Image (spheres, coloured by chain):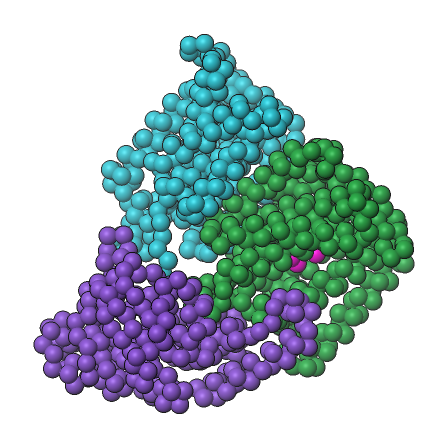
Amino acid sequence: MILELQGVTLRFGGVVALNDVRMNVESNEILALIGPNGAGKSCILNCISGFNVPQEGEIRFNGQLLRDQPSHTRSKNGIGRTFQGDKLIAELSVEDNVLVGRHAHMKTNVFQDFFYWPYSHKTKNQHKTEVDRILSLLDLQKYKKIAVSELSYGLRKKVDLARALATAPKILLMDEPMAGMNSAEKEVMARLVTQIHREFKIPVLIIEHDIEIVMNIANRITVLDWGRVVATGTPAEIQKNPEVIAAYLGQEDQ
Amino acid sequence: MKNNQLLSRAWLSIAVILVLIALPFFGGGRVIGIGITMGITMIAVIGLQLTMGYAGQVNMGQSAFMGVGAFAAGFCVSKLGFSAIPGLLCAGIAAALFGLVFGAAAVRIRGFYLALTTIAAQYVFIFIMLKLPHSWFGQAEGLRLKAVGLFGFTLNTDVRVYFFVLFVLVVLTIGAYNIVRSKTGLAFVAIRDQENASALLGINVVKYKLLAFLIGACYAGVAGGLWAYYVRYVQIDQFSLWLSIWYAGMIIVGGTGSILGAIIGTFVISMLQEALTFLGPRLAELVGTGSGQIVFAGMNIILGLAIMICVIYARKGLVGLLPRKLTSE
Amino acid sequence: MTTFLTFLVNGALIGLLYSLIALTFIIIYRSSRVFNLAQGELIVIAAFLIWSFSDRLPDNPFIAVLLATLALVVIGLIIERVIIRPLIGADVFSYVMVTIGLLLFLQGVVLVLWGPEIRLFPAIIDLAGVRIGGMVLDRALVYGAIATVVIATGMMIFFNKTQTGLEMTAVAEGHEIALSMGISIKKSLAISWILSCILSIVAAIMFLNGKGLSFAAADVALVALPAVLLAGLESVGGVLIAGLIIGITAQLGSYWLDPLVGGGVADVLPFVFMIIILLIRPTGLFGWKSVDRL
């Protein structure tokens, strides 16, 4: 397994957001994380990313303990991520937004930048080429120079994904990438997720509410409720699990 | 930016520089004096633009950084006999170190609280400068310099100072543009608009906040050094909180987040100040207060209004009013 | 010993003056989430208004104060409507710069209307000092200190126990929440500005009673900022303690350190203190902590 959480507990003051969470992600799978609102799904992603620090428990990535690593180091080491909502830089173009993802891999320092040394120029062009590759993969080439603020929500989520891919991740964390989309857009995104998983050969940990999509694309599912893991298994197993039905799927039927 | 756009921008810039080089031969002493002061202010304001406009770190202490640079350069030149460029290096480094201290605070303290911290630091700076040994920085009396030397010449005429300032301004402006277009510039904007997400995308937020203050302070320090060379008298009253506020005002009026905005803002506000100084005596009669006061009061009223109007109604400042072709970076 | 005690007590009195000034900032922030850096200028305007009215009505100081209060409230409400209202919900940079712009503007206006000369602020409170023990204390400061404690306590009760006050607290916590509960934000804003203006009048009297008044008096508000920060921008309760700490520290620091560095410690120590506090607790000592959301 490439990612492992053991006994992770996260508290905010008196509120227990995550309670002794134990889960893992295999290196060749798409794992979906589902559960009711407020169950703590985003908190798990935030703990893996380093945005929140759990009071108890261990998180291991590629065998390495993530305890003291700051967020930007985790990103550099391969933990890539998309965000809930819109976390793009509105006034910048699609190209520049995705270029932000290349930051950790750009090797110039500020002095070189000041003089725009030929080295700076060459480096920037190298990374722009990589950005181009990702943009054409996601069919965003025609929007390359357009400011992100002028794009539709669906396109912006695609740019978010492109940016995550630009960080050259070894695992992709996705926080409700399909929220706020219509079914056509969801189809496109779902297909992209599986395509990326196949072509980049990276595992995906995805938080998603749409059960149909989850059942279709996930290899395994982990169910969270009130900060605790309720069940883990294949889609078929989860569907039949009585606790899960009671906690989550049952509500979907209503 | 397409190549021909880049080229036409370059030609325009060269044309402007040529005009500026020719200026002393057509204008009089007053014009040269205005040019020097404006050039020095522009350097400080461009630095502030990098810290505040691009990296989004509020800094109400830019004039304190300038003061550090001025005193450092003054000390190096008058007590240690440095020449112009080593003096400026000292000024820049001294101010940058100061800036680093602020940057460290900015890592923990955000937004509004940071603004207040920088205001507080201005006062602390003034206090420290007044209390340090007299032989160091002259306390309340300040430092006096002889004209500083540069490659065998002495910068003892306004014209010579003008060209030196112009040279430094051009170098630092090009450098600023380069930073803005680079990895550093992109990181700054990312931190400004999406600080939390940026950290998770691989940007070392701490490092870049420090860098933002360091660079901005360095620019201010160099501006301070040039000021010391021009006026040849460095005194703590020259670096007040009001000056810091004026610098921030210039950025707002010119356009936040744009180097050109910093330049335009400085130019417009400085010209306004000259106009007011010129009209001073006439206005003073009208209102019945002293002429010096009316300039200060008038500037405050105008600048205050301009800032309020710009922030509420014209977010992109004067730069936002220009056609896009000239201003896209 | 008497000298030490005098410094201590004066520190407390001056500290409570800072608390009062800090309150004028905090009340505005609570209702609008906008920190009005120009608040200090309002205190100066309050002072000049009192001076102008007293000049015309030398025998009726209280009417003069009343008229000044009315005038200031009108000015305050105009500022609220035209400048602060558009800023609600705006980012920090925006309202910091707009209120700084307002600060510059008001400074300029004060200078043009009243000129740079130093005027004599009327002695609305008797100039004779208050004698306690071996100390002679400034009567205005003493009355003001008592008033501050009463006002602050009153505010705490108001915001925590009365209907209107609780509504205003809801507005302070979040405008969307308040709106969803049907609370009028406009009413909250108006009330807080009226309160703030009244407090500014009291602060002006307390600070300047019988002393020289010039446009530079606005600096006093800046020195009160450390008290605001120490208390936390929303905390009415913490402001008394914060003011006392700042005032006493400043005066004691002055007592011990002035001889060593040649004076000026009382003015700078609050700022040093503030920086240290912010480094330890970036949102003030008693302020509400906001949770960072991703």
Whether residue A123 is visible to the viewer of this picture, yes or no, is yes
Chain letter, green in picture: B
Residue sitting at x 62%, y 47%: B244
Left or right: residue A45 versus residue A215 is right
The x, y position of residue B315, in whole percent, is 55, 60
Quick one: C27 or B272, which is closer to the camera? Answer: C27
Residue sitting at x 36%, y 63%: A67
Residue sitting at x 30%, y 66%: A58
Kindly give the residue lying farthest to the left in the view shown: A242
* Residue range corresponding to the magenta coloring: B43-47
Quick one: C192 or B142, which is closer to the camera? Answer: B142
Left or right: residue C275 versus residue A8 is right
The x, y position of residue B99, in whole percent, is 60, 51
The x, y position of residue A219, in whole percent, is 25, 85
Chain letter, cyan in picture: C
The x, y position of residue B166, in whole percent, is 79, 59
B157 to B180, vertically: above or below: above
Chain letter, purple in picture: A
Q: Which quadrant of the rendered structure holds the N terminus of chain B?
A: bottom right
